[in-house]
């Protein structure tokens, strides 16, 4: 069977390849005294709050399961709009908000609406691999620009200006970022956006981890810049609804009918049941629970990052958000006679029964010396992982 060139150009998602190997080994050691500790997948160990679960059951029992508008339930768009005002102090009209089948659908819709064949989109290296594949799926090309710890693994305005070429369409940023958990300094983001706007480009910002910011300086939405910014968000991370597949995007008014037309044809609408459930995310009781969980994620970071440092796994940028630690394992590899982070990840999996993610997925510059730890697991699991790593690296 002939496979499309587009599909052939999509590289494997190595995070999931490693996860598959970890699951197989985990099944074999599940009943031993050292069951697998999974720190490889960025999924909160918390599930949807009680009010959200109750709202879903109520929607089922009342038959609220038919198609909604392609842009989402008007009531949910209004709730999201009010949340931006109360949480971030910005005015985002509900008319600019499009509810989507997860942030993935939002990114696909944005890329299909804005990218033509051959267009280039500038992105930092390292960055979340699927984001560049959304560009590729629209027949564009992701241009990865190497970043350093000194710039928090984020692009600078100078880099964007220097890399801009005749085919450049815009930038796709993430703040906080996966895999680093670092955010773009608001002043730098303003400068980047100015460079992009001056060239008639598009600024897309993945903000799915923004509510999980631990530093007020960085925890600001890019939507505060102006109405031209396109923001992608999700109910998966802060709102603990990963499998519900629900997200949203904020776009300029003129882009809404374009996105709506694409969504009608490609997705019909987001999950109706998930939308009705998500209405309860914004109830005061739910928000209070989410904030308590955010504090727990911060406590996990505050324990785990210094613990990694003590093991010789350097985290050059302390994450200011999300639930990841981007750790340099090169010293550990040299000590153990291991080639790179790919082999290190499998050694840790097999010897310590701790599943982590090698840097290969996230770019090409220096990623062979980095691994990503997810701190979305319980404190007990993190402590167990540290003890096993200490024993292995001793």
Image (cartoon, rainbow, N blue to C red):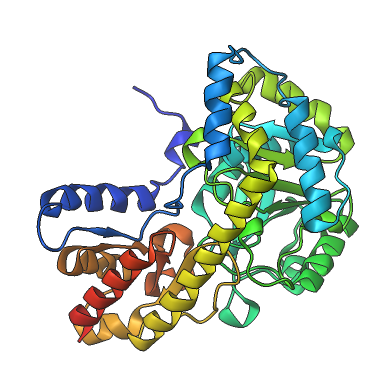
Q: Residue at image x 33%, y 70%?
A: 341
**Residue 79 in the image, given as x and y percentages of width and height:** 76, 38
The answer to whether residue 343 is seen in the rendering is yes
Please determine whether, in this image, residue 285 is positioned above or below residue 276: below
Q: Does residue 189 appear to the left or right of 232 in the view shown?
A: right
As rendered, which of 268 and 337 lies closer to the eye?
Answer: 268
Residue at 42% across / 52% down in the picture?
A: 45
Quadrant in which the N terminus is drawn:
top left
The image position of residue 370, as x and y in percent, is: 41, 72
Q: Identify whether 92 is placed above or below 334.
A: above
Q: Residue furthest front?
A: 285
Is residue 180 shown to the viewer in this render?
A: no
Q: Give the residue at x 46% y 44%.
A: 47
Nearer-the-camera pick, 247 or 273: 273
In the figure, residue 216 lies in which quadrant?
bottom right
Residue 345 occupies which quadrant of the picture?
Answer: bottom left
> Quarter of the image containing the C terminus?
bottom left
Q: How many marks?
A: 0
41 horizontally vs 386: left or right: right
The answer to whether 37 appears left or right of 198 in the picture is left
In the figure, residue 251 lies in which quadrant?
top right
- At a point 63% along the width and 43% down the height, the residue shown is 140
The spot of residue 23 in percent (x, y) is: 23, 48
- Between 254 and 378, the one lying in front of the other is 378
Left or right: residue 249 compared with residue 255: left
């Amino acid at each position: 069977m002939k496979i499309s060139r587009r599909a052939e150009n999509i590289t494997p998602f190595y995070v999931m390849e490693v996860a598959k190997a970890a699951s197989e080994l985990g099944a074999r050691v599940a009943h031993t005294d050292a069951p697998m500790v999974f720190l490889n997948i960025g999924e909160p160990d918390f599930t949807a709050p009680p009010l959200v679960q109750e709202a879903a059951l109520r929607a089922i029992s009342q038959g609220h399961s038919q198609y909604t508008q392609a842009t989402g339930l008007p009531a949910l768009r209004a709730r999201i709009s009010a949340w931006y005002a109360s949480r971030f102090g910005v005015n985002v009209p509900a008319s600019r908000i499009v509810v989507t089948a997860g942030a993935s659908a939002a990114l696909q819709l944005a890329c299909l609406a804005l990218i033509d064949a051959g267009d280039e989109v500038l992105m930092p290296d390292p960055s979340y691999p699927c984001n560049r594949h959304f560009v590729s799926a629209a027949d564009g090309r992701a241009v990865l620009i190497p970043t350093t710890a000194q710039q928090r693994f984020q692009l600078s305005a100078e880099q964007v200006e220097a890399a801009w070429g005749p085919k450049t369409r815009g930038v796709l940023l993430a703040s906080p970022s996966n895999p680093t958990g670092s955010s773009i300094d608001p002043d730098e983001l303003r400068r980047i956006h100015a460079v992009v706007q001056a060239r008639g480009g598009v600024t897309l910002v993945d903000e799915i981890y923004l509510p999980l910011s631990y530093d007020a300086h960085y925890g600001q939405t890019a939507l505060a810049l102006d109405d031209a910014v396109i923001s992608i968000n999700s109910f998966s991370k802060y709102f603990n609804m990963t499998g519900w597949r629900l997200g949203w995007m904020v776009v300029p008014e003129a882009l809404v009918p374009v996105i709506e037309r694409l969504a009608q044809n490609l997705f019909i609408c987001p999950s109706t049941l998930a939308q009705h459930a998500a209405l309860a995310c914004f109830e005061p009781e739910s928000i209070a629970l989410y904030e308590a969980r955010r504090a727990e994620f911060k406590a996990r970071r505050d324990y785990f990052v210094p613990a990694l440092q003590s093991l010789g796994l350097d985290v050059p940028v302390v994450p200011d958000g999300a639930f990841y630690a981007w750790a340099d394992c090169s010293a550990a590899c040299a000590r153990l006679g291991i080639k790179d982070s790919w082999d290190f990840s499998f050694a840790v999996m097999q010897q310590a029964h701790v599943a982590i993610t090698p840097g290969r997925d996230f770019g090409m510059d220096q990623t062979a010396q980095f691994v990503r730890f997810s701190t979305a697991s319980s404190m007990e699991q993190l402590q167990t992982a540290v003890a096993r790593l200490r024993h292995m690296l001793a």
